């Protein structure tokens, strides 16, 4: 049972998407687990063959409990029987030593003993080769099956009918969904821990995003609605790229030390209708094109609001970005989600008087905020980080 967040202690296994004997590779979705945040699709990180399930469906178990056994490719080879050695050449028969004729005494004559019939031959039921092969594969005793073929012979259809009758009824799938009350409890626990354990500092920075709006208008003019970029994609990409220069904001604080992350997995804060909130990750956001980033954001929002998230998306975020601009809020000050060390907030784009080349002009301005962990960074580093994000947003065509 994976840990799907700092606030998760247990999970409930609600569905297996594989069966024993199946081969899986890294990234395959193998199960669905219900947590306080909803139904999470569990991905596998070890390629191999599913050997055995260790937890029954609808069992609630602690984080770290083994759910299944997987035989790796190396283990499968080790478990395979060694190839049979070539059959040994037959030993020559010992030479017969002739005896004198007078010394040969013939054995007493015995009546012939009839050989017993082969066990089970008389009782063996007639069956087609296909039926015998299927029964052998499934471990079925043919004597328990009534045949419908000529002379009462058992056909493969008879074996399949027997298997269907013996199979347990399919278990009805429990409907999955978001328990918003439980999610609120989980959020409260995580945020209380964050404010108790993490020494937050807050900064804000106003940025002229008029160049972004002009560039987006020109780019989106000829595109259909589902192919257009939103300014949120530019903001997300700017944060991801700025992280490369300021890696101290990208990683985790665990065991009294900071662990920087080589990958940039940006958590996207998503509001769920009814009051829930979660922040699944967009993996390698710094390497994605703007189109791929926009597509990934849409996919995350749709699946999250449907209550179908993936385990890697819940465990991997290295920094979180939140925005309440669409709600009309001009600035937000986030709470760091442990064990991360920073969260960046974007407010609403508003029109403000702005000095450009010595003249006052109406410009589109957005307020960016940073909540940082003072155990890892300070206000000086935070100010440079926000300034870098602003600089990148001045040249959207380079993102």
Image (cartoon, grey):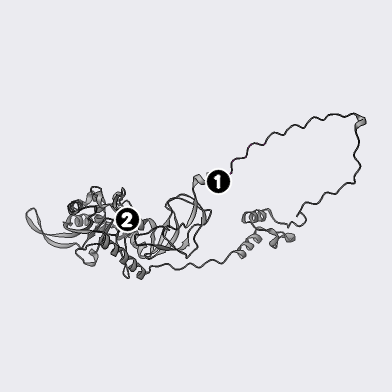
Q: Quadrant of the N terminus?
A: bottom left
Left or right of residue 129: residue 260? left
Q: Position of residue 211 (x, y in %)?
A: 18, 54
Q: Position of residue 251 (x, y in %)?
A: 29, 52
Residue 174 to residue 345: above or below: below
Secondary structure predominantly adopted by residues drawn in magenta = loop
Using the image, tell me which numbered label, if any, was put on residue 360: none
Q: Residues within 10 Å of mark 2 (few under 14, many from 20)?
A: many
Pick whichever, 80 or 396, lies toward us: 80
Q: Quadrant of residue 5?
A: bottom left
- Numbered disc 1: secondary structure: helix
Q: Residues within 10 Å of mark 1 (few under 14, many from 20)?
A: few
The residue located at (91%, 42%) in the rendering is 109
Left or right of residue 365: residue 243? right
* Residue position for label 1: 79
- Numbered disc 2: secondary structure: loop
Asked whether 17 falls inside the magenta stretch, the response is no
């Amino acid at each position: 049972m994976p840990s799907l967040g700092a606030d998760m202690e247990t999970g409930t296994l609600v569905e297996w998407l594989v069966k024993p004997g199946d081969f899986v590779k890294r990234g395959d979705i193998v199960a669905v687990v219900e947590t306080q945040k909803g139904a999470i699709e569990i991905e596998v990180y070890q390629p191999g063959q599913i050997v055995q399930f260790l937890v029954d469906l609808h069992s609630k178990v602690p984080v770290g409990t083994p759910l299944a056994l997987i035989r790796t490719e190396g283990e499968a080879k080790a478990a395979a029987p060694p190839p049979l050695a070539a059959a040994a050449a037959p030993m020559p028969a010992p030479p017969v030593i002739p005896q004198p004729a007078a010394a040969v005494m013939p054995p007493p004559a015995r009546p012939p003993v009839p050989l017993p019939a082969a066990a089970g031959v008389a009782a063996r039921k007639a069956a087609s080769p296909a039926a015998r092969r299927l029964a052998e594969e499934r471990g079925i005793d043919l004597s328990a099956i009534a045949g419908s073929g000529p002379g009462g012979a058992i056909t493969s259809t008879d074996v399949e009918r027997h298997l269907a009758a013996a199979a347990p009824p399919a278990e009805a799938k429990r409907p999955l969904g978001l328990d918003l009350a439980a999610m609120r409890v989980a959020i409260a626990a995580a945020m209380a821990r964050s404010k108790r354990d993490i020494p937050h500092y807050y900064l804000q920075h106003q940025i002229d995003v008029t160049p972004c709006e002009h560039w987006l208008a020109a780019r989106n003019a000829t595109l259909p609605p589902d192919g257009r970029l939103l300014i949120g994609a530019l903001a997300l990409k700017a944060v991801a790229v700025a992280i490369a220069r300021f890696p101290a904001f990208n990683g985790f604080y665990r065991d009294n030390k900071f662990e920087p992350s080589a990958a940039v997995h940006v958590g996207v804060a998503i509001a769920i209708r009814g009051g829930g909130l979660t922040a699944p990750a967009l993996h390698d956001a710094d390497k994605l094109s703007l189109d791929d980033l926009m597509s990934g954001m849409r996919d995350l929002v749709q699946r999250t609001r449907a209550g179908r998230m993936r385990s890697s998306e819940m465990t991997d975020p290295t920094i979180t970005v939140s925005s309440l601009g669409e709600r009309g809020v001009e600035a937000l000050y986030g709470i760091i989600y442990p064990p991360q060390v920073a969260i960046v907030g974007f407010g609403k784009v508003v029109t403000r008087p702005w000095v450009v080349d010595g003249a006052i002009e109406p410009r589109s301005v957005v307020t960016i905020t940073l909540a940082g962990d003072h155990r890892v960074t300070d206000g000086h580093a935070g100010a440079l980080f926000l300034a870098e994000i602003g600089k990148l947003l001045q040249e959207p065509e380079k993102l």
